[in-house]
């Protein structure tokens, strides 16, 4: 079987290493010398900023689906908050998410839910994503924006 016809995906070792180091480092918070309730509060707040404002509100609802409109400065702020989540650059993320919705639960959907809960939520991230090459097709509205390009290049 040739590479072109193979369904075998290659591991994305950069993602695997970053995820392993990040989660191993997070375990250090459980050492008594490192634990504090203020740290827990800060972690919850930063999770809200990066995940709630940045990814859910900014990248997903505002940019990917254009569910609402904001002044450009607020859009850029929300997109910046998303870059702090370590989920890749905004152009890449939006492109893959639009690709996911376009091909939802089909074989080319990189996080096809018919492959199971683990695959659709986490497993797909540990492999190279063939849909990467289609990101420009799905991001024509933001790909030329200098702020998006800067954040995509330097904050992923």
Image (cartoon, rainbow, N blue to C red):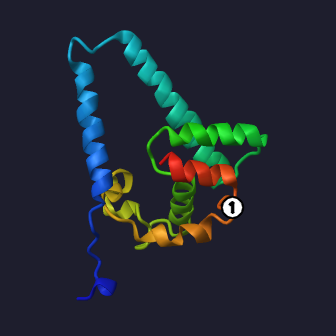
Mark 1 Cα shell of 10 Å, populated few (<14), some (14-19), many (≥20): few
Could one spot residue 118 in this view of the protein? no
Q: Position of residue 107 (x, y in %)?
A: 40, 73
Question: In the image, what residue occupies the spot 26% across and 88% down?
Answer: 2
Question: In the image, what residue occupies the spot 26% across and 74% down?
Answer: 8
Could one spot residue 15 in this view of the protein? yes
Q: Position of residue 74 (x, y in %)?
A: 72, 37
114 to 150, vertically: above or below: below
Q: Residue furthest right?
A: 71
Q: Is residue 120 left or right of residue 55?
A: left
Q: Residue furthest left?
A: 31
Q: Position of residue 79 (x, y in %)?
A: 61, 43
| Disc 1: which residue | 144
Dividing the picture into quadrants, the one containing residue 98 is bottom right
Question: In the image, what residue occupies the spot 45% across and 47% down?
Answer: 87
Dividing the picture into quadrants, the one containing residue 139 is bottom right
Residues 25 and 44: in front is 25
Label 1, secondary structure: give it. loop
Q: Position of residue 121 (x, y in %)?
A: 37, 51
46 to 86, vertically: above or below: above
Q: How many marks?
A: 1
Q: Quadrant of the N terminus?
A: bottom left
Q: Is residue 57 left or right of residue 37?
A: right
Question: In the image, what residue occupies the spot 23% across and 20% down?
Answer: 30
Residues 121 and 126: in front is 126
Residues 126 and 100: in front is 126
Q: Is residue 58 left or right of residue 122?
A: right
């Amino acid at each position: 079987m040739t590479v072109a016809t193979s369904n075998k995906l290659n591991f994305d070792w950069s993602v695997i290493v970053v995820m392993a180091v990040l989660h191993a480092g997070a375990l250090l918070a459980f050492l008594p010398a490192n634990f504090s309730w203020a740290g827990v509060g800060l972690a919850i707040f930063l999770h809200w900023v990066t995940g709630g404002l940045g990814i859910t509100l900014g990248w997903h609802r505002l940019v990917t689906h254009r569910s609402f409109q904001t002044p450009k400065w607020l859009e850029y702020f929300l997109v910046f908050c998303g870059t702090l989540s370590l989920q890749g650059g905004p152009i890449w993320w939006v492109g893959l998410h639009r690709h996911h919705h376009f091909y939802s639960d089909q074989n080319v959907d990189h996080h096809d839910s018919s492959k199971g809960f683990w695959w659709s939520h986490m497993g797909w991230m540990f492999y190279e994503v063939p849909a990467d090459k289609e990101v420009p097709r799905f991001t024509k509205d933001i790909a030329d924006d200098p702020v998006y390009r800067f954040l995509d290049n330097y904050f992923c």
